[in-house]
Amino acid sequence: MRKILILLISFFLVVSVSSVFAGGKQEEKPSAKTATVSAGAQPTSFKKIPVTKKVTIVFSGWGDQTEQKIYRDSIVRFNKIYPNIKVDYQPIPADFQTKIKAMMAGGTAPDVFYVDDQLMTALGRTGQLLPLDNYMKQAGVSRKDFITELLKIFTYKNKTYGLPKDWGTLGLVYLPEAFTAAGIPEPNDNWNWDNLFEAAKKIAKNTKFAGFIQNPDWARFAPWAFEAGGSYTNADYTKATLDTPEIKKAASYILNMKKAGALVTSSDVGASWAGEAIGKKVVAMTYEGGWMVNFMRQNYPNVKWKAAKVVKGLNGVRSDVIFTNAIGVNANTKYPTASAVFTIFVTSRENQAEIVKTGFAYSTHPDQINLIQNPNDKEIAAGGLVGKVAYWGPNTGKINDQVSKALERIYLGVQTVDQSFAEANKKVNEILSGNE
């Protein structure tokens, strides 16, 4: 399995983007020759950029207590290499994007913080994030060190404004006992849409379990759309492509599953989300990500569950959606070098390897795919090798919202597939043209 995964990811990453090095203001005066980590320390995959002064930088991200502990531990590891850089960790668990934007406007934003597609659009394209390429060059870090697809969101005019901190994807999460109860085999790598549909129908008809759960959500719809050959916009994000045969084929198939009783939503089974429905053992299958590992361990430790890859399309194509976030640096930080080296460390192979051990997230370095140990996590992560980031330029959030709304109208039966996606296509084109 390890060899197969490594070969697959090598194929997936054939496209590389050359770095363009941009200068940045310096609060220190690093020597022209970069230094390696001091004697006695563990070797690293990056060169140590000297930071001679004692400084304090503020770092913020979202996340619950589990995620916060992961980054507190990362700071401890960082300080073994850079003891003179104090990191004041100030998590913002709720309304992160709104608060960061307000803090940036008020001049009180952290030095280093999480960056998603929304913040990249608001800050990266307006010069409020620091280009990292020059610091990466000094540290001997290349864009090629990261999974290529993950950098797409955080690149603008060939400059890097964030380094991917983690990523996730979807897999087919299921309860083996539901298949046993229905007297049918468990999912395998050859499954396609029809296999999923038929299994869900049999389980719903012959057992106490609902078949397959999927809410009207752009992200869970994305693998279906991609496998049918669809996309939410064209390649340069200038035109909507929702009113197409490919998108409507995927949506129609899902609707047919719902009409046949093979597909339900969270509200249908009294759950707040699909993962909880699996934990409560009220549904047999869903598409969810690697976060299920810790969720099930913490909340439903006695429930036996498994994961497989998302099923193939009817054309034999398997595709998936990739979620990712980055860590970026405030362009107005007083300490750009210290902030940059912290960002480089947190996203380094060494630190990411430690994060992978927790089961929280996958490493953004392709040569570390084999570090995933949990068998369910491995199956889910394999989807990232054939997936793509659902990024549609600066209007990504608005476009994804329109897809979710289109699916909701279809689920409620207030519009047909053709009507709903024609409306979504019109609204997305208005968004792209600035006439919304």
Image (spheres, rainbow, N blue to C red):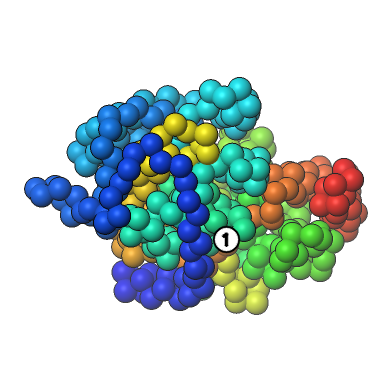
Residue name at image x 60 percent, y 76 percent: 316
**Which sits in the foreground, 62 or 194?**
62
Residue at 32% of width from left, 74% of height from top? 3
Task: Name the amino acid, label 1.
Answer: Asn
Q: What is the residue that sits farthest to the left in this orientation?
A: 40
Q: Is residue 205 left or right of residue 414?
A: left
Q: How many marks?
A: 1
Looking at the rendered image, the quarter that the N terminus falls into is bottom left
Q: Quadrant of residue 271?
A: top right
Relative horizontal placement of residue 53, taking residue 248 as reference (left or right): left
- Horizontal relation, residue 139 to residue 332: left or right: left
Disc 1: which residue:
158
Which residue: 74% across, 59% down?
A: 237
Q: Residues within 10 Å of mark 1 (few under 14, many from 20)?
A: some
Q: Residue 391: x percent and y percent?
A: 64, 55
| Whether residue 121 is visible | yes
